[in-house]
Amino acid sequence: MSLPTIRLGNNSDIEELINIAVTARAPLYPDNFKPIFNEYMINLFEVFKAIDKRITLIFCENYKSVGYLSFTNYIDRIEIDQLFVLPKYQKNGYGVKLVKECENLAKKMGVKKIIVASEHKALNFYERMDYKLTGETYKSILLSGIEYPYLEKNI
């Protein structure tokens, strides 16, 4: 058994990351949504491969990827794009560790602010780490009519 670790992701991880995202989201949506979300994630990762300022942190337990956080560095701020942990591994602090690692990297990069558009059910998760609502929202391109509130943290 190995200690849990966080490593940097690369393009060879994309299929595994899509599987984590789809598996983590599956309980939230009807069965017929899974293929749509899977296709969306594949297209999203194709776009992300072209963005050279995107960084993915992968949380591994026993050499298995069980969660990840992806963010984009916009020089003046970092935006957390995705945070997923497989359901079996949730409630173990892995998401918090990924966010804290993102914050540490942001500090090393000289970035002073992190923003994230969060699902309503995850607001408390971010607020416990001192993220504050901005009053702005992100409109989902996948689910019409769904808006996610933005949170930010100065680091």
Image (spheres, rainbow, N blue to C red):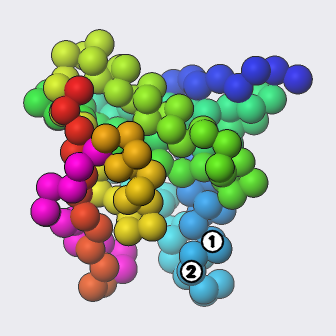
Where is residue 3 shown, x and y percent of the image?
76, 21
Q: CA distance from mark 2 to mark 1?
A: 6 Å
- Kindly indicate whether the residue at mark 1 contacts the one at mark 2 (C-beta within 8 angstroms): yes
**Residue 112, relative to residue 18: is it above or below?**
above
- Which region of the structure is painted magenta? 131-143
Q: Tell me if residue 135 is in the magenta stretch.
A: yes
Crowding at mark 2 (Cα within 10 Å: few <14, some 14-19, many 20+) = few
Q: Residue at x 57, y 23 (%)?
A: 7
Where is residue 107 shown, x and y percent of the image?
27, 18
Q: Residue at x 11, y 30 (%)?
A: 76
Q: Main secondary structure of the magenta part?
A: strand
**Residue 86, relative to residue 39: is it above or below?**
above
The kind of residue tagged 1 is Ala
Q: Residue at x 64, y 74 (%)?
A: 27
Q: Tell me if residue 67 is in the magenta stretch.
A: no
Query: In the shown orientation, is residue 17 left or right of residue 57?
Result: right
Q: Is residue 148 visible?
A: yes
Crowding at mark 1 (Cα within 10 Å: few <14, some 14-19, many 20+) = some
Query: In the shown orientation, is residue 39 left or right of residue 105?
Result: right
Extreme-right residue of the structure: 1
Name the residue that disc number 2 marks: 29
Q: Is residue 82 visible?
A: no
Name the residue that disc number 1 marks: 26
Q: Residue at x 23, y 38 (%)?
A: 153
The kind of residue tagged 2 is Tyr
